Amino acid sequence: MEEINQIKENQKSKFWNGIGGKLIFMGGVIGILLIGLLIISGQLSSREDTYQNAQHEISKSAGGILHIDGPFFVVPYRKTWEEKVYKNSTQFTETRVLNGYEYIPAESVNMDFNFDTETRSVGIYSAPIFTGKANVNAVFNVQVPADMGGVVYYPSKAVLCVLTQNISLMERPVLNINNTNYDTDFFNFDGVWALGTKIPLTSGKFTLSTKLDLRGAIRFAYKISSKDTKVSVNSDWKSPGFTGFTFLPDFRKISDEGFSAQWHIPFGSTETDQNIGVDFVEPVNIYQKLHRAITYGFLFIIVPFLVLFLFEIFAKINLHPVQYLLSGAATVLFFLLLLAISEHALFEPSYIVAAVAASVTVSLYVISITKKYALGLIMMLMFTLLYTFLFFSLRSEDYALLLGSLFAFGILAGIMYVTRKVDWYNIAKK
């Protein structure tokens, strides 16, 4: 019985000291490192929230996102009707009254925007703001709404206006209507703010021209309302974004001096939310890149572990799970180091510094614990390949999945080739 127990103990000892126990310990270490990677991912999300809050504060103080709609003639009306109501089983007739506004859009609109941009900062965070001028020209062919169905219009109280917020304007403009200048004020139509002037409305043609001194941040958007719309935007911002709007520009030119874009919508808006515009995109959003980088964090844990494990098989060394843990921790901290540095410097130099720091640290550590310089050089080559792959993957967003798939498959194929002659059943004896 004692001999049987001794045999079982020897088998257990061989298992835990052999390849089986090594793999189990490595699995535990990988789990610990994945938890660390999740903690870094949470820190990244927290810093991104702080960045977005800072952008919001900068945008708010600079006038916010610039929205413009119109111009319109706004005609107040009153609608009355009789409605039957019941109280205590007795029928009564009550008169209902609804006050509202009729919006009459322009026949054609031509707007020319010119924006100058600058970057404002709060602490280490920044956001683009812009100021500029808009030349607005519009033509109206007005037919005064006729009273009918209990609706009474008040064209004598009409307002010719452009829908925008007061914080978006730097100066009070003057509206030139049919070659006559009118002072402007802000009006509130059931919660909708508009800059305009009161002018009695009659059927016929009206022409409007004005210049607006505008300011805003991050985005400019114009809502289409007329039957024929022409808009041009010129700015010194080098990285505009035109997606996320109903219509892309018919013409655009982007250079180191800025951009210009033109739209022509030769038909009326069939929907209430059709718009055109531009986003003043920051050239590098490090948080988006870092989120994409962390998706490859598992590879940065597994691949160095596989290389160390192959060292044990082919270089006749024995590594402790703690040594795996320390090596893996350095590769995981690469992402935290990249986040910390890139918030204060350009992304590419930050990436190089973080990658060199992690790869050199682990490579020197391998040389120190194995006393073999060749293994350290192999580890350095592995990290060079790994960080080069990640760098080009982050730069090629459209091909990131393809590159990642090919890279992972290439690693698997390489390991299969290197270990093709390994006798896994007897490796523990050797």
Image (cartoon, helix red, strand yellow):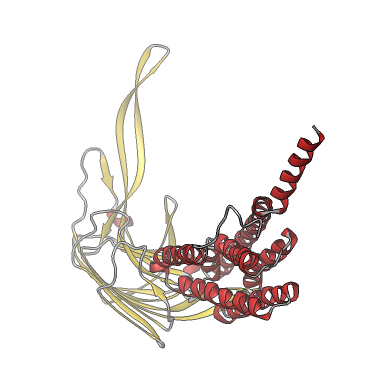
Asked whether, in this view, residue 333 is left or right of residue 81, the answer is: right
User: Does the image show residue 344?
Assistant: no
Residue 380, placed above or below residue 247? below
Residue 191, placed above or below residue 393? above
* Residue found at x 65% / y 74%: 358
Q: Residue furthest top?
A: 89
Residue 344 x, y percent position in the rendering: 64, 77
Q: How many circles with numbers are drawn on the protein?
A: 0
Q: Residue furthest right?
A: 2
Q: Nearer the viewer, residue 424 or 417?
A: 424
Residue 146, placed above or below residue 131? above
Q: Nearer the viewer, residue 344 or 419?
A: 419
The answer to which image quadrant residue 343 occupies is bottom right
User: Does the image show residue 68?
Assistant: yes
Asked whether, in this view, residue 128 is left or right of residue 133, the answer is: right
Q: Nearer the viewer, residue 154 or 209?
A: 209
Residue 65 x, y percent position in the rendering: 47, 66
* Residue found at x 75% / y 72%: 369
Which image quadrant: the N terminus? Answer: top right
Residue 241 x, y percent position in the rendering: 39, 71
Asked whether, in this view, residue 272 is left or right of residue 410, the answer is: left
The answer to which image quadrant residue 122 occupies is bottom right
* Residue found at x 44% / y 63%: 409
Which image quadrant: the C terminus? Answer: bottom right
The answer to which image quadrant residue 354 occupies is bottom right
Q: Nearer the viewer, residue 332 or 25?
A: 25
Asked whether, in this view, residue 298 is left or right of residue 175, the answer is: right
Residue 283 x, y percent position in the rendering: 48, 76
